Amino acid sequence: MTKYKLNITGYIILCGTIFASVFALHYAFIDPNLYEFRDDGVITMSVGRHLVEYGFFGVSPSGPIVEASSSPVQTLLYAAAYALTGASFKMFATVQTYVATFLIGVFCGLIFATDRLIGLICIGFMAIGLSFVYPFFLWHGSGMENALTHTLFAASVTGMVLMVRKERVDWAWALPMVLCCFARPELIVWIALLLGVFSFFFWRAFRRLDALWLTLGIGAVCFALHGLRFAYFEALLPNTAIAQQISVGDRLDALLHRSGEALAETKQIASKNFSQGAWWIGWGGALLMIALPKPREFRFRRAKYS
């Protein structure tokens, strides 16, 4: 039987279009007042507009320098859009949602590109499935940084899958991983965990430390950027964390001295999130198994000893 062929450019455009179309169709059946233009997104974009109009990060032209945004990447992205086009908050948030959704389709499509017909079917199932995981779906369209974090996280995972598949490290994939760490600063923990697993897997499979050097390079860039943040704002925690009374020290103290209470609270939150989206883990995992190398195609390399 002749295998269906579709050139890679057409394939990834189609993947992005499927994802964006499914999300747009589902959003059309939901009252936008339930999810659009949440206050955190408006605050973040306000800081970007303030940067363009007054030349520093803040919320008032007569006030001090403050990091009132929880997403440095979104702040700078909106600042650039506002400076170039004068985009309103609503216009930027709408464009951000659909461009990000399109790119998620593109990146996920690259994972499944080894069989493009099967890939298109998988992309359709993924888009439909994610559109019914409402904590993901509604926050994705909220105008906050969620659309950016979803896209950059998808790009980071895609990069790791492709580097394993090609058996070589491509430093271009460091860009979305670094940006992900600043689209929402606490995501650095999850990127670090993913990179740790990726580095071990790459070494175990190919007996090379290339992935470890990539991990260390990304860590060095993040450290340098946080150093610049500290030099400018004179604090590592943004003002939003102070306003919400979020303290890393207090949370560590609670974990060390009141671990039972802290773990109980964490378990309650995790259980709720898991119950709302756990079905997607099985669905997404099954699709990912289609994309990953099969045992007959992939073997761990044994170390050679002289």
Image (spheres, rainbow, N blue to C red):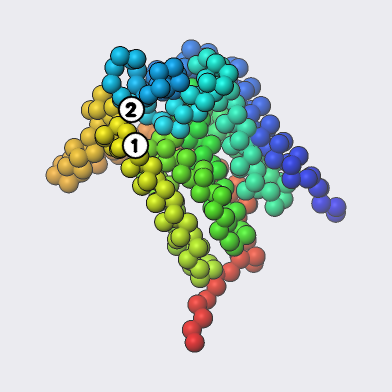
User: Horizontal placement of 187 versus 102: left or right?
Assistant: left
Q: Nearer the viewer, residue 202 or 255?
A: 202
Marks 2 and 1, Cα distance to the nearest angstrom? 9 Å
Q: Mark 2 highlights which residue?
A: 67
Q: Residues within 10 Å of mark 1 (few under 14, many from 20)?
A: some
User: Horizontal placement of 227 versus 292: left or right?
Assistant: left
Q: Mark 1 highlights which residue?
A: 229
Q: Residues within 10 Å of mark 2 (few under 14, many from 20)?
A: many
Tell me: residue 222, above or below residue 304.
above
Q: Residue at x 55, y 73 (%)?
A: 301
Q: Quadrant of residue 68?
A: top left
Q: How many marks?
A: 2
Mark 1: which amino acid?
Arg
Q: Nearer the viewer, residue 148 or 35?
A: 148
Mark 2: which amino acid?
Glu
User: Horizontal placement of 75 versus 90: left or right?
Assistant: left
Query: Where's residue 18, x and y in %?
Result: 68, 32
Q: Residue furthest bottom?
A: 306
